[in-house]
Image (cartoon, grey):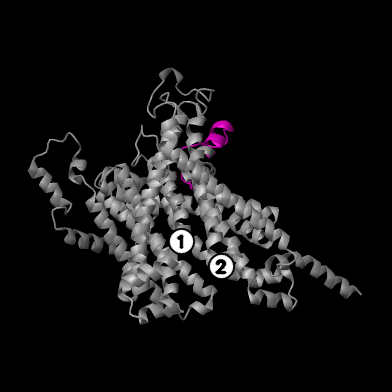
């Protein structure tokens, strides 16, 4: 009798867990909630990214003031009806600077991710498809670049190229390229094993044609996911470099340099640092959410774990 | 096992050589004459004097020779001297490495403990409120830049609550409490993004293991829940988590460059940032190499631990 009750108890205690993991039937509802939650997060991400893109493109057109226009009598004044995010230490309207700054983040993000993607895809395709010593060499190069802390490598490249916004894009593009290469190389390795590649080779298709027509289209899903997540990393990197005074020096309205130049006035005017900081956080979050959502949608293998 | 370790150590050599070469090339491509920087802007030196200084630092030799000489010195433990202060780098690093090491270790502890705890709990209580909270916290953690986190922490704990100082450094051995008070905010700024990444990863690693056949077998043969988790789930989930934590060490080291700058900590990160601004070639070259070497050594340790934990990998 007591044995039975112990067994029942153990079973009851464990069903929740066992169900959630293995048997989909009884936890179906909870799994469904989870899926809904994930979809909501992905949707939130997509909305944030869309709003960010619209602000980046049209923001400067609707900004009430110029990004460096100074109203010295309004220095460090708090949020008001006219200046909803307050004024900074030079009496510049933080809302206007934020709108102009979005364009900087967006441009750096697009071009840096573009550079990383092109370099990473080309090298990843070569390494993954041809293998051999070429793969060993490229993989070694990748390992070498991974050994440097990203931000440190970016700072060093900036020092080498010179301090300009264009070089920020190049520096971030270079330091993030190995991550693209790793993603592409891994995907190519698995695509290369498939029968359709074998048949393409056997009917005599040229290698560039196979790479273009058969390999590349089959690695776009992980590539899109990685590009979205990498956009988040690029925006963060740009903000960090700007924070250190690289690329976007004051009075440039880059969000990162807005946080750093307001740091000395943190006690007097916390909004001047908090507003651009929150803007960076929300933007990066948006791309991370979108990337996760795209992964759920495009990569069914990962769906069960998320 | 020994064979595995030896092979793994040998594999480090080409990577470290590559790192040294890339560092050398980048540093030597930085525009600006280090001798001019050394002499200062208003120095009225004759070309002869400049040539002498150049020769004294070996800057007049061909680049490949300079590279090999530098490498030769580094291998024998001589990292060179700062152009600016003339102090040997080994002395400088003896002072600065402990600061950065303490900061990074502190940040790693602050990050790892909650990350593993909540990552495992979230996976075990999948789709519970705790799980949702963990997911959201992790997402926020990977999205907020460390310098903004530092700004918010200073605003709250130094300015509003006035609990903690916002700048400065005291060595631990001289004033342990003061040291911890000064280190806690930088460590949290550095540790939270680290925590977020590990937390996300722990959760999915545990979930993956929970879905494995051997866990079902363990349950089917009647093992108590706690034993299934401790004996079968955690060790297997721990291996990939360890790898990610090892890789993230590079991010922690990189983060010190920014965090030490904000909190004015006299560590390696701040040193290298200043050296780049000053075109202090030997410092940038050697310190970057040291940082990359630390990372490569950490990955070596991780790989060896990996083989200890997972016998299948020893023979690969």
The structure residue drawn at horizontal position 52% and vertical position 52%, both measured from the top left corner, is A290
Callouts 1 and 2 on one subunit? no
Q: Quadrant of residue A91?
A: top left
Which label sits on residue A301?
2
Q: Is A162 part of what is drawn in magenta?
A: no
Q: Magenta-highlighted stretch: main secondary structure?
A: loop
> Which secondary structure, mark 1?
helix
Where the C terminus of chain B falls, by quadrant?
A: bottom left
| Position of residue A246 measured from the top left corner of the image (x, y, whole percent) | 34, 42
| Direction from residue A90 to residue A303 in the image, left or right | right
* Residue A266 in view of the camera: no
Near-viewer residue (A194 or B56): A194
Marks 1, 2: nearer the viewer = 2
Q: Which mark is residue B95?
A: none
Circles 1 and 2 in contact, beta carbons < 8 Å: no
Q: How many marks?
A: 2
Question: Helix or strand or loop: what does disc 2 sit on?
Answer: helix
> Residue at point 19% right, 35% down?
B41
Task: Tell me if I can see residue A73 in this picture.
Answer: yes
Work out whether residue A150 or residue B27 is closer to the camera in this orientation and state it. A150
Q: Residues within 10 Å of mark 1 (few under 14, many from 20)?
A: some
Look at the image and give the residue range highlighted in magenta: B153-173
Return the x and y of residue B172 as percentages of the image width and height. 49, 47
Cα gap from disc 1 to disc 2, whole angstroms: 24 Å
- Subunit of label 1: B
Tag 2 subunit: A
x, y percent for residue A89? 43, 26
- Provide the residue designation for mark 1: B247
Give the image location of residue A103, x and y in percent.
40, 39
| Residue situated in front as seen by the camera: B160 or A192 | A192
């Amino acid at each position: 009798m007591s044995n039975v009750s112990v067994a029942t108890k153990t079973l009851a205690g464990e069903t929740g867990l066992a169900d959630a993991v293995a048997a989909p039937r009884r936890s179906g509802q909870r799994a469904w909630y989870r899926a809904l939650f994930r979809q909501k997060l992905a949707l939130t991400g997509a909305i944030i990214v869309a709003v960010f893109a619209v602000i980046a493109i049209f923001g400067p057109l609707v900004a009430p003031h110029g990004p460096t226009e100074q109203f010295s009598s309004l220095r460090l004044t708090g949020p008001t009806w006219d200046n909803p995010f307050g004024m900074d230490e030079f009496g510049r309207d933080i809302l206007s600077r934020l709108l102009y700054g979005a364009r900087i983040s967006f441009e750096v993000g697009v071009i840096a991710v573009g550079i990383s993607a092109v370099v990473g895809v080309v090298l990843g395709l070569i390494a993954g498809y041809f293998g051999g010593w070429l793969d060993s060499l490229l993989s070694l190069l990748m390992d070498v670049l991974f050994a440097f802390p990203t931000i440190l490598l970016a700072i060093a490249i900036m020092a080498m190229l010179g301090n300009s916004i264009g070089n920020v894009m190049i520096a971030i593009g270079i330091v993030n390229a190995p991550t693209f290469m790793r993603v592409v190389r891994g995907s190519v390795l698995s695509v290369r094993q498939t029968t359709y590649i074998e048949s393409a080779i056997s009917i005599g298709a040229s290698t560039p044609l196979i790479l273009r027509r058969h390999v590349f289209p089959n690695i776009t899903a992980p590539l899109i996911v990685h590009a979205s997540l990498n956009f988040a990393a690029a925006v963060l990197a740009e903000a960090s470099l700007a924070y250190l005074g690289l690329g976007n020096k004051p009075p440039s309205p880059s969000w990162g340099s807005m946080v750093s130049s307001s740091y000395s006035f943190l006690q007097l005017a916390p909004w001047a640092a908090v507003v651009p900081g929150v803007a960076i956080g929300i933007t990066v979050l948006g791309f991370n959410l979108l990337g996760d959502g795209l992964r759920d949608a495009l990569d069914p293998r990962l769906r069960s774990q998320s | 096992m020994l064979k595995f370790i030896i092979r793994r150590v040998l594999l480090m050599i080409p990577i470290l050589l590559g790192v040294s070469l890339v560092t050398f090339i980048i540093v030597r491509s930085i525009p600006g004459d280090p001798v001019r920087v050394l002499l200062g802007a208003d120095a009225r030196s004759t070309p002869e004097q400049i040539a002498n200084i150049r020769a004294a630092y070996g800057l007049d030799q061909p680049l490949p020779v300079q590279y090999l000489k530098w490498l030769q010195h580094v291998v024998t433990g001589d990292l060179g001297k700062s152009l600016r202060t003339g102090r040997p780098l080994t002395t400088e690093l003896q002072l600065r490495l402990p600061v950065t090491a303490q900061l990074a270790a502190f940040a790693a502890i602050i990050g790892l403990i909650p990350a593993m705890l909540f990552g495992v709990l979230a996976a075990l209580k999948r789709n519970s409120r705790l799980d949702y909270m963990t997911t959201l916290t992790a997402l926020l953690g990977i999205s907020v830049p460390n310098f903004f986190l530092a700004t918010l922490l200073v605003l709250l704990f130094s300015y509003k609550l006035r609990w903690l100082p916002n700048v400065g450094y005291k060595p631990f051995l001289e004033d342990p409490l003061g040291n911890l008070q000064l280190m806690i905010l930088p460590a949290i700024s550095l540790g939270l993004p680290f925590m977020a990444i590990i937390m996300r990863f722990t959760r999915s690693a545990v979930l993956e293991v929970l879905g494995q056949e051997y866990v079902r077998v363990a349950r089917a043969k009647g093992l108590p829940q706690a034993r299934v988790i401790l004996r079968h789930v955690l060790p297997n989930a721990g291996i990939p988590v360890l790898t990610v934590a090892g890789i993230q060490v590079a991010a922690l080291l990189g983060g010190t460059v920014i965090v030490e700058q904000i909190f004015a900590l006299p560590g390696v990160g701040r040193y290298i940032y200043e050296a780049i601004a000053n075109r202090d070639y030997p410092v940038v070259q050697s310190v970057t190499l040291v940082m990359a070497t630390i990372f490569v050594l950490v990955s070596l340790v991780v790989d060896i631990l990996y083989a200890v934990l997972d016998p299948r990998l020893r023979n690969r």
